[in-house]
């Protein structure tokens, strides 16, 4: 099915462990984004990508790493998870510009113990 | 530095009421102002968007009013229904290391039956 998917949907990990969240889109959209959603903060941009092999920092990039070797995939890695990274993570994609419509995945709820 | 201010944080209305959610932005360089709707456990989805060459846009029961001089836009939900209960996010272009979409903090709407 066409769309944007995220995996896993739920993840519990421990402080200090490395965690990778996956994002896959089937539209061939150029732009992809990672957000975290925390109560009272709305959606905050972590990293974004304008095309394969082109990534850049967003508002809250510290502690996260991204890569984009293929247009359809945009994994987000927490190199050494901390409790403050407990959040709901959303991946999004867009065909236009950085300020055009974005299409969101279903989210990954991450808990760091 | 908050570049998109959304209010109120939460809103409770009776069925048939007209909830109004407001959004104020700072950056005037771009021309696309969307509202996203998010149901519990789901990712945000585009609800309605406006470009500032018009002052109002209607799609079904949803209306955006845009005031370019005041740098504000608002979402009105006519004849609100319990199924409209969700979190609503406005978004506007902002400048955080390059122009990108900045989301408001969100408004949790509850429509009483």
Image (spheres, coloured by chain):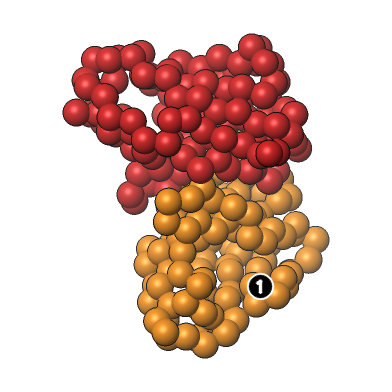
Chain colours: A red, B orange
Give the camera-side residue of A13 and B100.
Answer: A13
Q: Chain of mark 1?
A: B
The location of residue B48, given as percent across then percent down, is 67, 61
Q: Quadrant of the N terminus of chain A?
A: top right
The local secondary structure at tag 1 comes to strand
Q: Quadrant of residue B52?
A: bottom right
Q: Residue at x 28, y 29 (%)?
A: A12
Q: Quadrant of the C terminus of chain A?
A: top left
Q: For this view, does A90 lie left or right of residue A32?
A: left
The location of residue A38, given as percent across then percent down, is 35, 44
Q: Residue at x 53, y 80 (%)?
A: B80
Q: For this view, does A6 lie left or right of residue B113?
A: right
List the single residue furthest toward the front: A1
Position above or below: B18 against B39: below
Inspect this view and state whether residue B20 appears.
yes
Q: For this view, does B4 lie left or right of residue A54?
A: left
Q: Quadrant of residue A55?
A: top right
Q: Which residue lies under the disc numbered 1?
A: B63
Give the camera-side residue of B48 and A75.
Answer: A75
The location of residue A102, given as percent across then percent down, is 64, 43
Q: Residue at x 51, y 71 (%)?
A: B84
The location of residue B93, given as percent across then percent down, is 62, 44
Q: Quadrant of residue B57?
A: bottom right
């Amino acid at each position: 099915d066409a769309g944007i998917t995220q995996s896993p949907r739920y993840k519990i990990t421990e402080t200090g462990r490395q965690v990778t969240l996956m994002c896959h889109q089937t539209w061939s959209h150029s732009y992809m984004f990672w957000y975290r959603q925390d109560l009272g903060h709305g959606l905050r941009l972590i990293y974004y990508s304008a095309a394969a092999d082109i990534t850049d920092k967003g508002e809250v990039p510290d502690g996260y790493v991204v890569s984009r070797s293929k247009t359809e995939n945009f994994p987000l890695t927490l190199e050494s998870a901390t409790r403050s990274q407990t959040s709901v993570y959303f991946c999004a994609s867009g065909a236009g510009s950085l300020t055009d419509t974005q299409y969101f995945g279903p989210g990954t709820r991450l808990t760091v113990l | 530095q908050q570049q998109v201010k959304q209010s109120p944080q939460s809103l409770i209305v009776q069925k048939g009421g007209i909830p109004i959610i407001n959004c104020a932005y700072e950056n005037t360089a771009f021309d696309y102002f969307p509202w996203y709707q998010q149901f519990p456990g789901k990712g945000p989805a585009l609800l309605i968007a406006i470009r500032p060459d018009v002052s109002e846009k209607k799609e079904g029961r949803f209306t955006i009013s845009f005031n370019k001089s005041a740098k504000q836009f608002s979402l009105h939900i006519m004849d609100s229904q319990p199924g409209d209960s969700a979190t609503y996010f406005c978004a506007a272009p902002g400048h955080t290391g390059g122009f990108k979409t900045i989301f408001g903090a969100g408004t949790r709407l509850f429509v009483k039956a």
